[in-house]
Image: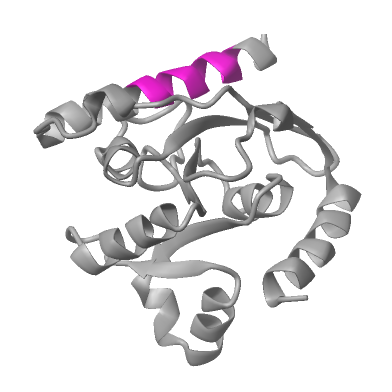
Amino acid sequence: MGLYEICKGIFIPIISIFYKVEVIGKEHVPMDEPLIFASNHKNNLDPMLIGSLMPRKVSYMAKKELFKIKIVGYFLKNINVFPVDRSKTDISTIKTALKILKSNGALGIFPEGTRMKQEGLGKAKAGTSMLAIRGKAKVCPVSIIATYKLFSKITIYIDEPISFDSYYGQKLNSKDYEGLSQQVLDIIGENIKKYTE
């Protein structure tokens, strides 16, 4: 058993003490093909929730500064986290993400690019659809519906996977990718609205 599985086995019982967690839509998740879990991001618990509660092992990006602390970097690498430079486009990060997808792995991505502290959702960055198209991966929109108040409910809704296969081989610019990523974020927003009304 690897460190990923050990952490998952520890995290799920602990989070269940403090929140009532419900995951809906696991049946929508393709199990043996390249996949991106794209979710909204309001709290530092979000990556751990997705990493622990999805029916597949999920790889995540984290800011490169965290990896400068040796013990933290070692831990992150062993739970499928790899570094990203948020100040610029990092070719090595893109290559790592595509390598994961091309080996039928699953990536966790926040389409907004970072944690949103304000109400509502932000604007989608290009990355989600760019990686999906270049990595020939489907995208599962994942809506995290939570206030994160202690002992409150956290609902995680996994929608049906989206395919961008009609765009494979096309020459797209950053605006095109942003527009396609926004479509994913809009679905996430619609499901948040549905479960909070």
The stretch in magenta equals 183-193
Residue 115 x/y as whole percent: 44, 46
Q: Can you tell which quarter of the image residue 166 is in?
A: top left
Above or below — where is 40 with respect to 189?
Answer: below
How many marks the image carries: the answer is 0
- Secondary structure of the magenta portion, mostly? helix
Q: Tell me, what colour scheme is on the image?
A: one colour
Position of residue 89 measured from the top left corner of the image (x, y, whole percent)? 18, 58
Residue at x-position 35% and y-position 73%: 64
Queried whether the magenta region covers residue 34, the answer comes back as: no
The quadrant the C terminus occupies is: top right
Horizontal side of residue 77 vs 197, given as left or right: left
Q: Which quarter of the rendering shows the N terminus?
A: bottom right
Residue 137: give x, y in percent of width and height: 41, 40
Q: Within the magenta stretch, is there residue 185? A: yes
Residue 133: quarter of image: top left
Q: Is residue 32 above or below residue 57?
A: above
Foreground of the two, 27 or 124: 27
Closest to the observer, 94 or 197 = 94
Whether residue 168 is situated above or below residue 78 in the rendered picture: above
Name the residue at 35% across, 45% down.
113
Residue 91 vertical position relative to residue 154 in the rendered view, above or below: below
Relative side of 127 to 185, left or right:
left
- For this rendering, which residue is in front, 34 or 146? 34
Q: Indicate left or right for 109 with 12 as reference.
A: left
Give the residue furthest to the bottom: 70
**Which of 76 and 164 lies nearest the eye of the viewer?**
164
- In the rendered structure, the answer to whether residue 167 lies left or right of residue 156 reads left
x and y percent of residue 92 in the render?
24, 68
